[in-house]
Amino acid sequence: SAEDTRAIEAMGMIGHSVFVPGSSLTLNGESASVGIDLAQPVDQLKVTILDSSGIPIRQMELGPKPSGFSNIPWDGKTDTGSQAAIGEYTFAVSATQGGNDIKVEQFSLGQVKSVAQEDDKTLLDMGDKLGLVSLADVKQVF
């Protein structure tokens, strides 16, 4: 059945990194990534990285982006050019097209710990921070 196929696909994701809906960001090395999904192309995209207190430490003006999913790398640097500390961050995205605000879906990168079945849904356990996520919401596997 289709459900069995999805479960098998999900099992293959254990230990892999995937993008799931969220706005959290873990810096555990020198760089990290966030994901965005745009319903339409935009001419301005801005990603703001915030520390655990919610204070912006980096603003990235990224210019035009196509519709669909994009993986946005963060080099782990703050606006002052220093290396940010390893730890937990959040991010906020704003996008405009012709001066109008465009809705952006935000995705966090996390590692699949295990797979669970609930009713007729396949769920991925992303650990404490991201929790259980429906396989249907996953964007990209590495």
Image: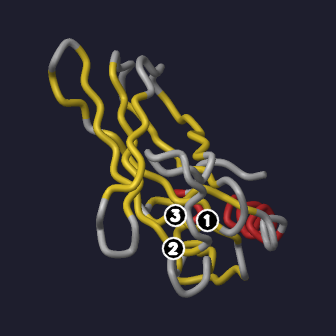
Tell me the tag on residue 130: none
- Crowding at mark 2 (Cα within 10 Å: few <14, some 14-19, many 20+): some
Taking depth in this image into account, of 121 and 93 the one nearest to the observer is: 93
Image point 73% across, 69% down: which residue? 7
Q: Nearer the viewer, residue 59 or 137?
A: 59
Residue 82 point in image, percent of width and height: 56, 53
Q: Which residue corresponds to mark 2? A: 88
The residue at the point 79 percent across, 64 percent down is: 16
Label 3 vs label 1, nearer the camera: 1
Q: Considering depth in this image, is 81 or 4 the residue closer to the camera?
A: 81
In this picture the colour scheme is secondary structure
Where residue 77 appears, as percent x and y from the top left, is 56, 50
Q: Is residue 129 above or below residue 31?
A: below
Q: How far apart are marks 3 and 1 (CA)?
A: 7 Å
Marks 2 and 3, the one that precedes in the sequence = 3
The spot of residue 75 in percent (x, y) is 63, 46
For the residue labelled by badge 1, is the local secondary structure a helix, a strand or a loop? strand
| Residue 1 image point, x, y percent | 73, 62
Mark toward the start of the polypeptide (2 vs 1): 1
Q: Which amino acid does label 2 sit on?
A: Glu
Specify whether 88 is left or right of 12.
left
Residue type, numbered disc 1: Leu
Residue 39 versus residue 115 in the image, above or below: above
Q: In this view, does 41 lie to the left or right of 73?
A: left
Confirm or deny contact between disc 3 and disc 1 (CB under 8 A).
yes
Few, some or many C-alpha atoms within 10 Å of disc 1 (few <14, some 14-19, many ≥20)?
some
Question: What residue would you read off at disc 1?
Answer: 27
- Find disc 3 in the rendering and name its residue: 25
In the displayed structure, does residue 24 sit left or right of residue 102? right
Q: Distance between the residues labelled 2 and 3?
A: 6 Å
